[in-house]
Image: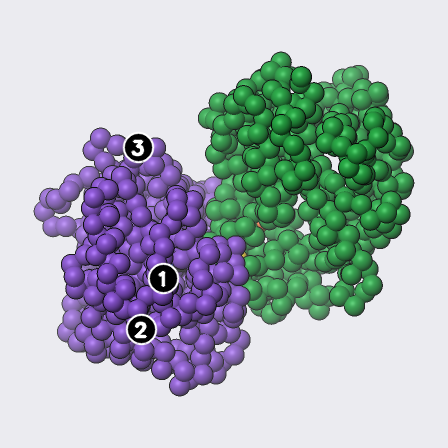
Chain colours: A purple, B green
Amino acid sequence: MKTLARELKAILGQAGVIDDPTRLVPYESDGLALYATRPELVLLPRDTDQAARAMAVLARHGTPVVARGAGTGLAGGATPVENGVLISTARMRDILEVDPEDRFARVQAGVVNTQLSEVCRGHGLMYAPDPSSQMACTIGGNVANNSGGPHCFKYGATSRHVLGLVLVTHAGEVIDLSGPWVDPQGLDLVGLFVGSEGTFGLATEVTVKLVPRPPVVEVLLAIFTELEAACDAVSEIIAARLQPSALEILDRLTIEAVEQSVFAAGYPKEAEAVLLIELEGVETEVSGSQQEISAILNKHGVLSTRSARDASERRDLWAGRKGAFGAMGRIAPDLYVADAVVPRTKLRALVRRTVEICRERNLKLANVFHAGDGNLHPNICYDRRDPDEVRRVLEAGRLILETCVEAGGSLTGEHGVGLEKREEMEIAFAPEDLETMCRVRDAWDPDRRMNPGKLLPMRACMELRTPSPRA
Amino acid sequence: MADLANRDGLVDYAKSLDCIHCGLCLQSCPTYRITGLEPSSPRGRIHLMRAVAEDRAQATASFVEEMEFCLLCRHCESACPAGVRFGEMMEHTRSRISTHRGLGARLARWFGFRVLLPNRRGLKLAAFLLRLAQKGGVLRLLSKLGGRFENLRYLPPVPTGSERRPLPRKNPGRAPERGNVALLEGCVMPELFGKVNRDTCSVLNVMGYGCALPARTVCCGSLHAHNGDLDGARNLARLMIEDFEALGYLPVVVNSAGCGAHMKELHHLFEPDDPWHARSRAFAGRVQDLTEFCAENLDSANLGPVDEKDWPAPVTWDDPCHLCHAQGIRAEPRTLLSAIPALQAVDLPDSEHCCGSAGIYSLLRPQASGEILRTKLEALESSGARTLVTANPGCQLQWQSGLLRRGSEVRVAHLAEILASSLAAD
Ligand SMILES: Cc1cc2nc3c(=O)[nH]c(=O)nc-3n(C[C@H](O)[C@H](O)[C@H](O)COP(=O)(O)OP(=O)(O)OC[C@H]3O[C@@H](n4cnc5c(N)ncnc54)[C@H](O)[C@@H]3O)c2cc1C
Ligand code: SF4
Ligand code: SF4
């Protein structure tokens, strides 16, 4: 490692290579602190060129590499690997270009999601995907995890907004796919890369699509005395072909936690569930759907509905929703966020089942989820210092996933597979499918040095006998 | 310094468990923003503390460095949905670290915290010498040494002796119609910002209040608490509480956000079963920042236009960290400014970000402090403001020296100065 560090310092400068053992400690985990592995080194390149040259050195040494954005991932995707180094994009945070006429922006991978939104605001544009972690997470991390957010119900997840990429391969080659192409030419490598969780290579620059800000926005807060009724209302709004821009549910425990936090939004504490609905468009469009939605809410026994008075109340209501995960820190030291997608017609039954699964295991559960997308986030409180509780949490997590997949849903809504759900991939995919995925992976990274052990189950890739193209 | 472990109670472990590792605080942190380093972020610092407490890491020199690199601006607390009490954790850890320092550092700290700060005569002498050094060009010479000394050249000039005269102990001016309030004069304030104190008094007088000053209190002890001298902070807290109680249980008005934040939280210094805990809580209940007090009690009908010569428009408000993050005061100063007739005010982008002053931080770490200030200066430029208003002496000094260095004409005012100017208009 000493010679490796020396070579890397020659490229990245003293400050661009962290090798002090104490300073490496905080890099051992991402947002899922259940897993921890210390990296040998942390590298902080400033641009594509530095990243490429560093990667070439790492290739020569055969060192495994894990990319890290802000480390807000909830599946252990950015957890370092044994004897590996971490490449942090935290110093690649320049906005390279904003083109309001052609409605795209080109940014370095470490640019923070809200930073991009801020820059676009002045042009009447926005970058639509808005993960709840947007004040911290990076565009590179969003690309790698194909992240979603409340507004992705209307606008689609990150993959729908990436127009181009600059990539550095495992060997240190630069692939410039920076576009912006609305329709990719030839094989859509950009599309393939989005969601690859750092196993294909390092994204250093991202070209994203910008969309116009809607002229009118209305946020409704619907209060329910029953969580299941709120679920039913959502199912019916979807079935009625209405298209709000966001549909989010928070249950009682979540509301309590949020209301105690700095993000207290004025959610009523006596509610069993609140449904947050955002409508946008032109005036008539918004008021039209508001009426239809109100009728549906009433039918499902809504206790009351009110709309946010002004922009600042809208902001507060959203801040409360987005602070929900963190606010749970008041309830327990750790939080396990399951992330599964279910058919939206089955919300009620599946939410009920998750409640049962946790109750049977004596676990504290809070539900807050992107209801519009059928993306459940059962949040299970625990303390990582209690091994038995950790075991029960993981068991519950697995059962919830199995239940959702059985019901026709999918393994991950937006947080990715990472380390956490790697083995569960076998629930959702047949061995042949996994094998195909490993082949695609090998095409990008034949030595399997990029984020090894993530995303694809170990076994599937180990057993794969395809000779690597280099061999 | 040898590595430490948590057997000496280095870390407030229970509080560290509140952190859920979500990372939402990262971008709020000035040291993370300038370095991009996880160990220099709130989450990283808490992670390190917890690792030390769990014996998974040693408190090495780099651990100590990361703890001291923090500005204790507490912006992370405003961002943290889990309610992590970062300030308290950091004060705790720093106080334990400081018992392990080398002799030289201990001596310097002893002199600064125990001899100089609590002693009016010492402070006066220091201000006098500093002024002499500025006048005689000694500082300019020193600044040629570069490094830590370079900044000395941009220290705003120490005011003249008459500017530095203390407030009269007996309340001047007309008889108070609405009674007295107790005022904290502060340690450095009278030496560097005597005018702000006098303006504060005159604002309160016009509002109908007399100002009562405690007999012995010089420094409130916030600098001590932030820099690891909790014992020193406790001594000063006891003295101050007694001193203010002796004035009768008056509202305590503070015009320095850093002091006010500390005075509202004195009870953190004492264990719950210590009688001083309850006493400091009661004291804290009477403390109000000047902006709070004025927003509540000032009749805006008395406000006239401010003097454009002194304070050219547009003006902008910069939130001192210890006002917005530590005391949660954001609306009051804005309300006051907007009540002033014909005052053109503009928003300062990222006004809640730290300016890098942080008590004595700007003296101890001029480079980091300057880098943090740089983005603030750019924000100020983009706002087009010609007067920047704040409510904390440290911030005022930091802005002044940054603007001086840039050769900028923008003026820096304490809100008390603006209010005084507005109330003086006829
Ligand atoms: C409070 C909270 C709320 C959240 N809410 C949402 C939400 O609403 N929707 C959602 O989808 N997610 C959410 N998440 C999860 C997480 O924020 C997202 O997955 C986010 O995209 C991760 O970004 P990051 O920069 O933190 O990446 P990291 O966590 O650092 O990394 C994530 C993955 O991306 C890889 N990676 C990072 N940068 C690069 C790069 N430049 N090139 C290649 N690979 C890279 C890493 O190796 C890792 O596998 C939330 C997390 C938290 C803590
Ligand atoms: S107090 Fe300020 S400098 Fe210290 S960790 Fe928090 S945000 Fe960063
Ligand atoms: S926001 Fe709070 S809970 Fe989240 S990482 Fe920062 S300190 Fe920890």
Q: Amino acid at mark 3?
A: His
Label 2 neighbour load within 10 Å: few <14, some 14-19, many 20+: some
Q: Amino acid at mark 1?
A: Ser
List x then y, in percent, for residue A140.
33, 49
- Name the residue beneath numbered marker 1: A304
| Among numbered discs 3 and 1, the one appearing first in the sequence | 3
Q: State the separation of the CA atoms marked 2 and 1.
A: 16 Å
List x then y, in percent, for residue B362.
66, 36
Label 3 neighbour load within 10 Å: few <14, some 14-19, many 20+: some
Let me know if marks 3 and 2 both belong to one chain. yes
Eye-nearest disc, 2 or 1? 1
- Name the residue beneath numbered marker 3: A123
Q: Quadrant of the C terminus of chain B?
A: top right
Q: Write the residue at 44% across / 59% down.
A: A267
Which of these two is toward me, B87 or A359? A359
Q: Write the residue at 49% across / 60% down.
A: A259
Q: In the image, B256: left or right of A307?
A: right
Q: State the separation of the CA atoms marked 3 and 2.
A: 41 Å
- Name the residue beneath numbered marker 2: A228
Let me know if marks 3 and 1 both belong to one chain. yes
Asked whether mark 2 lies closer than 8 Å to ligand 1, one says no
Q: In the image, B128: left or right of B408?
A: right
Q: Is residue B146 above or below residue A408?
A: above
Q: State the separation of the CA atoms marked 3 and 1.
A: 37 Å
